[in-house]
Image (spheres, grey):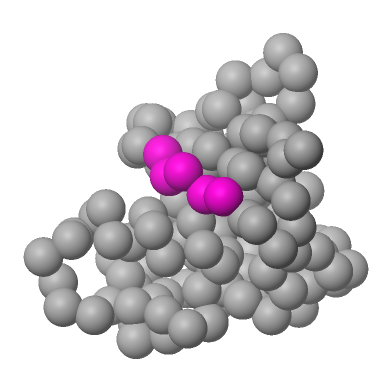
């Protein structure tokens, strides 16, 4: 039986670029995804986004808006995720890899640069980009 879990993706911007991490050690290893993770019991999506960004990148951020969600069945691992996307504004720090067992690289890329790497994107991020500008050819 599959479980439904809630994931949160933090959309941290620097101008028109988004902060992404190359995933390691979990499903989607080797793909680019947003900072984020599982929403914990009693935590709001905004609190999850702020916590995960700090844990994964060392950045201090504040959540500014709920951006939407994706529906992400992951049959290969027997899980079904609903991923909530939260906009976050930088408040301090320099982005760096804080959990090398969970991420091997960090980059600031535009949505178009991410779309050009579509085959390298974690599923929820690819779907989020589709929702951002579905009229852009892929």
- Report the side of 62 relative to 132 (left or right): right
- Report the side of 36 relative to 64 (left or right): right
- Report the side of 134 relative to 6 (left or right): left
| Point 35% across, 37% down: residue | 67
Extreme residue toward the front, this view: 1
Which quadrant would residue 102 be assigned to in this image? Answer: bottom right
| Point 41% across, 80% down: residue | 118
Whether residue 110 is in magenta: the answer is no
Whether residue 72 is in magenta: the answer is yes
Q: Position of residue 103 (x, y in %)?
A: 76, 70
Extreme residue toward the left, this view: 135
Q: Quadrant of the C terminus?
A: bottom left
Q: Quadrant of the N terminus?
A: top right
Q: Position of residue 10 (x, y in %)?
A: 52, 47
Q: Where is residue 55 in the image (x, y as percent from the top left)?
A: 77, 48
| Point 62% across, 27% down: residue | 47
Please report the bounds of the magenta region as a residue range. Answer: 69-73
Q: Can residue 85 be seen in this view?
A: no
- Report the side of 11 relative to 67 (left or right): right
In front of the other: 4 or 70: 4
Q: Is residue 53 visible?
A: yes
Q: Position of residue 74 (x, y in %)?
A: 63, 55
Which quadrant would residue 50 be assigned to in this image? Answer: top right
Extreme residue toward the top, this view: 42
In front of the other: 20 or 6: 6
Is 80 placed above or below 35 here?
above
| Point 36% across, 37% down: residue | 68
Q: Is the magenta region chiefly helix, strand or loop?
A: strand
């Amino acid at each position: 039986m599959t479980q439904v879990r809630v994931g949160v993706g933090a959309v941290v911007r620097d101008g028109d670029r988004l902060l992404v991490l190359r995933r390691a050690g979990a499903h989607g290893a080797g793909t680019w995804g947003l900072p984020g993770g599982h929403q914990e019991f009693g935590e709001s999506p905004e609190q999850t986004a702020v916590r995960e960004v700090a844990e994964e990148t060392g950045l201090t951020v504040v959540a500014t808006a709920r951006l939407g969600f994706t529906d992400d069945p992951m049959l290969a691992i027997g899980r079904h995720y609903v991923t909530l996307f939260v906009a976050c504004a930088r408040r301090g720090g320099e982005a760096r890899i804080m959990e090398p067992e969970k991420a091997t690289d960090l980059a600031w890329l535009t949505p178009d640069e991410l779309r050009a790497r579509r085959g390298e994107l974690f599923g929820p991020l690819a779907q989020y980009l589709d929702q951002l500008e579905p009229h852009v050819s892929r």
